[in-house]
């Protein structure tokens, strides 16, 4: 069962080949068998899942179900789920059960999906390796000594190892695309505002966006159909009609103009990755696309700009964890100041503290203009580079990550080298654009991802390009040995 795509699973459920309860049992069994090695789940909600599966079976039998009805899904532990713990990978929220569901969760519930559990992640989504999680690192199913990427590493590993057919993730600077690339799956970061952020624990509100993770672009399209759309509970959600993302998958891509930014394909890119990406681009040429070199002149500023803007917003968002209202509270506080200091000191891990310190510093009265305001101006220049590029080409292609999955511990003590893992993904979040990562090959038996960036609200075009590529290649069908 677990080798079927979402579309195939949906057909099998509808034709009665197996029930949602049987399918759910099958995945719960796989989680039990394999997740002790992978650590991709923080919480497995077996009881809740089986209850939802029975309800989905009833819905399917009455002929009311849609394409998602009865499909098991894993949600990143950043989405609030009523009655199921939401930890955000942090000791701070280890005891937190939300009283309500995030809009993304509600939409999947309404569509009849079954929640298998909540996946492991970097603490408060800060990281590129899943090593900052309070619940320990996740292992990459392709090589257990290596990271799955982050911060949605639990979702990526669970889908790659087929412990869940599909999952949700969030992407603030690359956290859907980079783990998707490192685990050999497909992941889409939608346009900022396309998917509701309501009930999604905030890291950097002007950058955070939820998106789907699955094996194929066709599966991602089905998930996005469920997730996307206006939500009046999120003031940055955009009121724009949601197309049927599956409708354009088969469209001919002859004549599509693909831009290759010269700043991305330079000597810092590993030759092994460059070779894999070049092969992928040749396949697109066979499909009729035209290739052009373009320039994104401010590329080198993306990482430094992000690491001012994101910590600034994080320091403000995380000020709500004060030990007074919810989350971790220190034992026997002497007074209110001791309560704040020790609850935050004991509840947050070191990467989160580093971000809060940087963020507070760049927002402080004396340094605001020099750092935060400057970063906002650079953010505009970076967006303008993309705007200019999209007057010349339809999509932009690049590697998703400059390296394949690195070893656990390899970069843990070197934050700057970790931050550079996001060099190709971060500009997209600063500009608010959509981008997808798809599997395109291997180097040293480790998967490599190709990133396709589109103009605002052009998710359907990205899915169309990715789907056409997946029709003529089979990288997305590879399974790690032992799973
Ligand atoms: N790796 C980036 C960071 O640590 C992005 C994380 C994310 O997208 N949530 O901030």
Image: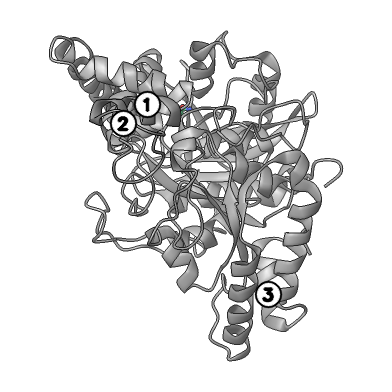
Q: Nearer the viewer, mark 2 or mark 3?
A: 2
Contact between labelled residues 3 and 2, with CB atoms less than 8 Å apart: no
Horizontal and vertical percent for residue 383? 29, 28
Look at 49% across and 24% down and name the residue there. Answer: 422
- In the figure, residue 389 lies in which quadrant? top left
Horizontal and vertical percent for residue 359? 29, 21
Horizontal and vertical percent for residue 447? 71, 32
How far apart marks 1 and 2 lie (CA) works out to 6 Å
How far apart marks 1 and 3 lie (CA) works out to 46 Å
Q: Which residue is mark 2?
A: 339
Is 277 placed left or right of 64 in the picture? right
Packing grade of label 2 (10 A; few <14, some 14-19, many >=20) is some
Kindly give the residue lying farthest to the bottom in the view shown: 62
Is 157 placed left or right of 429 in the picture? right
Above or below, 283 against 363 in this view is below
Contact between labelled residues 2 and 1, with CB atoms less than 8 Å apart: yes
Look at 50% across and 14% down and name the residue there. Answer: 415
Q: Which residue is mark 3?
A: 20
Q: Nearer the viewer, mark 1 or mark 3?
A: 1
Kindly give the residue lying farthest to the right in the view shown: 482
Of 339 and 230, the residue lying toward us: 339
Which secondary structure lies at badge 2? helix
Packing grade of label 3 (10 A; few <14, some 14-19, many >=20) is many
Look at 37% across and 33% down and name the residue there. Answer: 332
Q: Which residue is mark 1?
A: 342
Of 113 and 101, the residue lying toward us: 101
């Amino acid at each position: 069962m677990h080798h079927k795509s979402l579309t195939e699973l949906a057909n099998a459920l509808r034709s009665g080949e197996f029930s949602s309860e049987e399918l759910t049992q099958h995945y719960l069994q796989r989680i039990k068998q394999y997740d002790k090695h992978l650590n991709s789940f923080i919480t497995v909600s077996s009881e809740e899942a089986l209850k939802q599966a029975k309800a989905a079976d009833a819905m399917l039998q009455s002929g009311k179900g849609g394409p998602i009805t009865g499909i098991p899904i894993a949600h990143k532990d950043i989405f609030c789920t009523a009655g199921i713990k939401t930890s955000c990978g942090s000791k701070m929220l280890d005891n937190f059960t939300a009283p309500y569901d995030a809009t993304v969760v509600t939409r999947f519930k309404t569509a009849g999906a079954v929640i298998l559990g909540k996946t492991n992640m970097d603490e408060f989504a800060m990281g590129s390796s899943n090593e900052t999680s309070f619940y320990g690192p996740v292992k990459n199913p392709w090589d257990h000594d290596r990271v799955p990427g982050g911060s949605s590493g639990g979702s990526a590993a669970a889908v790659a190892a087929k412990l869940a057919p599909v999952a949700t993730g969030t992407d603030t600077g690359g956290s859907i695309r980079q783990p998707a690339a490192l685990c050999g799956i497909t992941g889409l970061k939608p346009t900022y505002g396309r998917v509701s952020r309501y009930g999604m624990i905030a890291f950097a509100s002007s950058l955070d966006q939820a998106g789907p993770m699955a094996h194929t672009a066709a599966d991602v399209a089905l998930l996005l159909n469920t997730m996307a759309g206006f939500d009046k509970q999120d003031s940055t959600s955009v009121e724009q009609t949601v197309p049927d993302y599956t409708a354009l998958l088969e469209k001919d891509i002859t004549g599509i103009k693909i831009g290759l930014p010269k700043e991305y394909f330079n000597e810092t890119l590993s030759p092994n990755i460059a070779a894999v990406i070049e092969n992928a681009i040749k396949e697109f040429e066979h499909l009729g696309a035209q290739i052009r070199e373009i320039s994104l002149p401010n590329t080198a500023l993306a990482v430094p700009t992000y690491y001012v803007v994101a910590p600034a917003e994080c320091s403000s968002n995380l000020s709500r964890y004060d030990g007074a209202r919810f989350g971790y509270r220190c034992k026997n506080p002497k007074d209110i100041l001791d309560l704040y200091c020790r609850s935050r000191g004991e509840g947050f891990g070191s990467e989160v503290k580093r971000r809060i310190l940087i963020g507070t510093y760049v927002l402080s009265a004396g340094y605001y203009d020099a750092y935060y305001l400057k970063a906002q101006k650079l953010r505009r220049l970076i967006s303008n580079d993309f705007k200019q590029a999209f007057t010349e080409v339809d999509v932009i292609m690049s590697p998703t990550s400059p390296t394949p999955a690195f070893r656990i511990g390899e970069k843990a003590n070197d934050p700057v080298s970790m931050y550079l893992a996001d060099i190709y993904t971060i500009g997209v979040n600063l500009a608010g654009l959509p981008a997808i990562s798809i599997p395109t090959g291997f180097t040293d038996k480790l998967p490599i991802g190709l990133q396709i960036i589109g103009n605002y609200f052009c998710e359907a075009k990205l899915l169309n390009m990715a789907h056409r590529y997946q029709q003529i290649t089979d990288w997305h069908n590879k399974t790690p040995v032992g799973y």
